[in-house]
């Protein structure tokens, strides 16, 4: 069989092979990320449904002091420390007190009037945090984050090569390009479902992939290191790159809390009556949070976007802080409060953050479906449903076309001659997506020095069609 001349660029068959291998690797992860991402999109509604038994409290009678609410919460988890007090969403809603103990965080629902503890949640098992770890880490920590980042990087290749294959250079109309042909046989049906769905969801899918990268353990650290070098100092980011970052923050807070809290301004050690029956050292420790009533008096009238968290100092002589922790990040506000008077010492709005933080924060809000309300969630649902359709239709086409005994990759017809432009593009992608660049080098070396030396693997992968 004569050897075909080398391709002068990216011919259809070469791109098809890249699309095939990228898709075959990515499809399980795309399905997983689509399902878990969809659940996360609607986690506010899910959490609201789970909290509905506690969200219709009586408003009859005066509210207890915030310090008393904190004391009731701390008594529920002996030995715990206050992390933050979350203001009730409405007059009928409970206060939510977040407490730490042994690197674990708990959320305790307290009736502000009766001081009854209504519910205790392990913060790591709440719907948003659990699904977030399923989505971004596969519940296996940094290793899962690496796997997801690798799959996301190859998913970008899958989408871009798919757009190349879709490009209607020889189309005679819009059928099969912008809408599927439904009555021309199974082969055309599945091909069009795959291609047409791809063109409508590709932009949104790429947006989700790019806006998800700052959370990834490797890529997020890569970005932070680059910012550190460019700024000449460590940077503080309003997002985490893995659950290990959260644990590290808790460990630091616990360490700081072990210092002499009585030396902190605003930490009043006077005795106050306790409304709860538990007898534990945590009750005495709770008296150091008397200043929280002054903080809440300052923060509550400001009308910050829910949820609003008020947190004690994390070190001696530190200030209290308050912030809007809304998922709609452009609405977030951070306050620094005087520990003695509760006065606002500093206010930081989203627009005051560095431009890169604003871009990433806005992208994260849109990624999570919280930037423009229900319409944002429905757009996310459209994208994840499209990705599932792409994945399943791709699997159907592969199974229908796959010969027995081989993987079924499109057979190469000619060698690719790597032009300067193509090499520059590959280098750029490899630098922007380090996992992609590293894996491409690994795959190339494995194919060149291992797989081509094993006849069975060479045949099964379809590597022996052309001469090297």
Image (cartoon, rainbow, N blue to C red):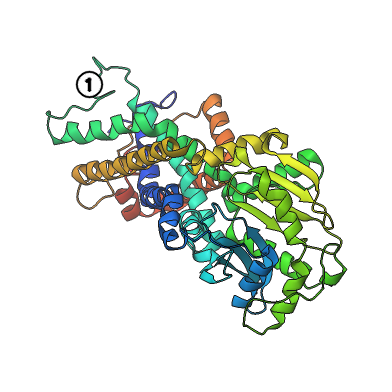
Residue at 20%, 42% in the rendered image: 401
Per the image, label 1 sits on a secondary structure element best described as loop
The single residue placed furthest to the top in the displayed view is: 172
190 on left or right of 238: left
Which image quadrant for residue 303?
top right
Q: Outermost residue, bottom direction? A: 279
Residue 32 showing in the rendered view: yes
The x and y percentages for residue 329 are 60, 41
Is residue 211 or residue 124 the one in the foreground?
124
Q: Position of residue 357 (x, y in %)?
A: 66, 39
Residue 126 or residue 202, whichever sits in front: 126
Residue 416 spot, x, y in % from top left? 43, 31
Pick the front one: 122 or 76: 76
Name which quarter of the figure residue 410 lies in: top left
Q: Quarter of the image for the C terminus: give it.
A: top left
Residue 85 appears left or right of 407? right
Please state if 182 lies on the left or on the right of 455 as rendered: left
Q: In this view, does 127 lie to the left or right of 313?
A: left
Observer-nearest of 390 and 430: 390
Q: Could you tell me which quadrant the N terminus lies in?
A: top left
Taking the spot 31% from the left edge, 55% from the top edge, the residue there is 456
Name the residue: 54% across, 54% down.
91
Q: Can residue 160 be seen in this view?
A: no
Q: Which residue is drawn at 62% across and 48% down?
A: 220
Marks counted in the figure total 1
- Report which residue position mark 1 lands on: 175
> x, y (%) of residue 336?
78, 49
Name above or below for residue 313 compared with residue 278.
Answer: above
Assess disc 1: are there few (<14), some (14-19) or many (≥20) residues with their C-alpha within 10 Å of its C-alpha: few
């Amino acid at each position: 069989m004569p050897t075909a001349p080398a391709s002068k660029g990216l011919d259809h068959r070469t791109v098809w092979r890249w699309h095939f291998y990228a898709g075959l690797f990515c499809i399980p992860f795309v399905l997983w990320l689509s399902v878990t991402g969809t659940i996360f999109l609607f986690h506010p509604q899910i959490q609201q449904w789970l909290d509905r038994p506690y969200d219709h409290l009586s408003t009859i009678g005066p509210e207890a002091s915030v310090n008393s609410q904190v004391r009731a919460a701390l008594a529920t988890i002996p030995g715990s420390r206050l992390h933050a007090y979350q203001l009730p969403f409405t007059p009928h809603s409970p206060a939510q007190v977040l407490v730490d103990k042994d690197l674990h965080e708990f959320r305790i629902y307290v009736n502000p009037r009766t001081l009854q503890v209504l519910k205790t949640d392990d913060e790591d098992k709440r719907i948003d945090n659990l699904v977030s770890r399923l989505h971004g880490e596969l519940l296996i920590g940094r290793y899962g984050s690496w796997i997801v980042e690798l799959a996301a990087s190859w998913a970008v290749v899958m989408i871009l090569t798919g757009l190349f294959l879709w490009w209607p250079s020889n189309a005679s109309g819009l059928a099969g390009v912008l809408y599927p042909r439904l009555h021309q046989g199974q082969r055309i049906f599945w091909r069009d479902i795959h291609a047409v769905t791809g063109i409508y969801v590709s932009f949104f899918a790429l947006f989700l992939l790019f806006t998800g990268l700052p959370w990834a353990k490797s890529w997020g650290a890569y970005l932070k290191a680059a910012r550190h070098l460019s700024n000449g100092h460590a940077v503080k980011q309003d997002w985490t790159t893995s659950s290990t970052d959260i644990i590290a923050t808790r460990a630091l807070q616990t360490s700081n809390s072990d210092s002499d809290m009585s030396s902190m301004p605003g930490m009043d050690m006077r005795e106050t009556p306790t409304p709860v029956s538990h007898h534990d050292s945590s009750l005495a420790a709770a008296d150091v949070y008397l200043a929280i009533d002054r903080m809440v008096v300052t923060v509550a009238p400001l009308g910050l976007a829910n949820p609003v968290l008020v947190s004690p100092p994390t070190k001696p002589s530190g200030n209290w802080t308050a912030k809007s922790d809304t998922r709609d990040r452009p609405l977030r506000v951070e306050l620094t409060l005087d520990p003695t008077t509760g006065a606002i010492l500093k206010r930081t709005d989203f627009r005051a953050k560095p431009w890169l933080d604003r871009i990433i924060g806005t992208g994260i809000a849109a990624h999570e479906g919280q930037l423009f309300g229900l319409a944002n969630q429905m757009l996310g649902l459209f994208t994840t449903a499209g990705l599932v359709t792409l994945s399943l239709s791709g699997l159907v086409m592969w199974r229908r076309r796959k010969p027995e005994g081989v993987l079924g990759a499109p057979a190469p017809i000619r060698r690719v001659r790597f032009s300067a432009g193509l090499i520059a593009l590959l280098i750029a992608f490899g630098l922007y997506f380090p996992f992609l660049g590293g894996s491409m080098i690994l795959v190339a070396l494995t194919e060149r020095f291992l797989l081509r030396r094993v006849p069975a693997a060479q045949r099964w992968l379809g590597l022996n069609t052309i001469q090297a």
